[in-house]
Image (cartoon, helix red, strand yellow):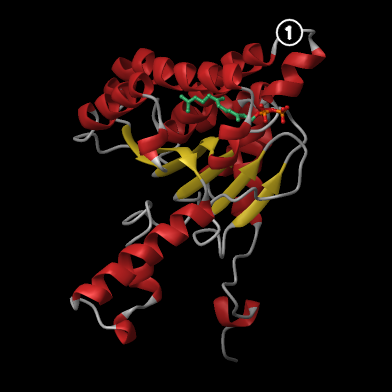
Amino acid sequence: MTKAETIESLGRIRPELLSLAEGKLPRHVAMIMDGNGRWAKLRGLPRSAGHYEGVKSVRRMTELSSDLGIEYLTLYAFSTENWHRPVEEVEILMHLIGLAIEQELPDLIRNNVKIRLAGDLDRVPEEALSRLRKAEHETDVCTGLTLIICISYSSRWEIAEAARRLAGEVAKGSLRPEDISEESFAAHLSTAGIPDPDLLIRTGGDYRISNFLLWQIAYAELKFTDTLWPDFDKEEYAGILLEYTRRERRFGKTSEQLSPSPEI
Ligand code: FPP
């Protein structure tokens, strides 16, 4: 669907969403997908049922982001800390993430979605990793939405890794310490080349960042919703996008500096 058609169909559900057509949408949205376990528990189902249902939300969010012309969507699929979950849950999650990507691959390609991976991938089991790598490889030519899947990811790991690589370059003599800048540091993160998120959404009712994109969200707008990830739908996402278009992003400046009143 084109952006105009998408907004028109959202407007049929909630008329105020038609205003999305006028606002400046974020270039990059990041999401902490939380609440799968509780969603399942509420229904007397195993936690894995929540993760399976969560994949449907991943599909919906990818679809809407792509249809609205958002350039980057980053999803926190599995954190470094998630390795401490029970072995069976870790196995199910890894299997599910690989399987979902494999099954969605034809649609991702058809919709021009480019997959990129971020995280300590050496720890990811071979079966899931080969499926993820295949998707990354086969969508490399896509030019629409970039879908960044953070897996075995933690921000402190990523920052320490960048510091290690920069220190290595200094030790080799190819970099001078005084040449390390915010830009060169960012270029050593796993999100190198991707603009910082403009908007970070966390579902599931908790108000924390959980070691996600700590460097990159310095100026992101934050939105926390109580909705559990499997229940997070396009309408709510669109409502959050609309709220974003109405926030004033000052980047440390004053309102007056952003839109000076005309001289009289
Ligand atoms: C957090 O809910 C969710 C996760 C740790 C996994 C999220 C992964 C998916 C939805 C699959 C992603 C698939 C792709 C293709 C990217 P939780 O288990 O912490 O829920 P709780 O807080 O209710 O226990």
Given residues 69 and 77, the one toward you in this image is: 77
Left or right: 47 in relation to 167 = right
Identity, as a three-letter code, of the amino acid under mark 1: Leu
The x, y position of residue 102, in whole percent, is 34, 16
Q: Does 227 sit above or below residue 69?
A: above
Please give the name of the residue rendered at 68% of the width and 29% of the height, measured from the top-left corner.
14
The x, y position of residue 9, in whole percent, is 54, 24
Extreme residue toward the top, this view: 44
The x, y position of residue 206, in whole percent, is 76, 42
The quarter of the rendered structure image containing the N terminus is top left
| Quadrant in which residue 217 is drawn | bottom right
Q: Does 182 sit above or below residue 222?
A: below
Residue located beneath label 1 in the image: 45
Can you see residue 162? yes
The quarter of the rendered structure image containing the C terminus is bottom right
Left or right: 28 in relation to 135 = right
Please give the name of the residue rendered at 50% of the width and 50% of the height, measured from the top-left corner.
26
| Quadrant in which residue 202 is drawn | top right
Q: Quadrant of ligand 1?
A: top right
Q: Residues within 10 Å of mark 1 (few under 14, many from 20)?
A: few
| Quadrant in which residue 231 is drawn | top right
Given residues 104 and 184, the one toward you in this image is: 184
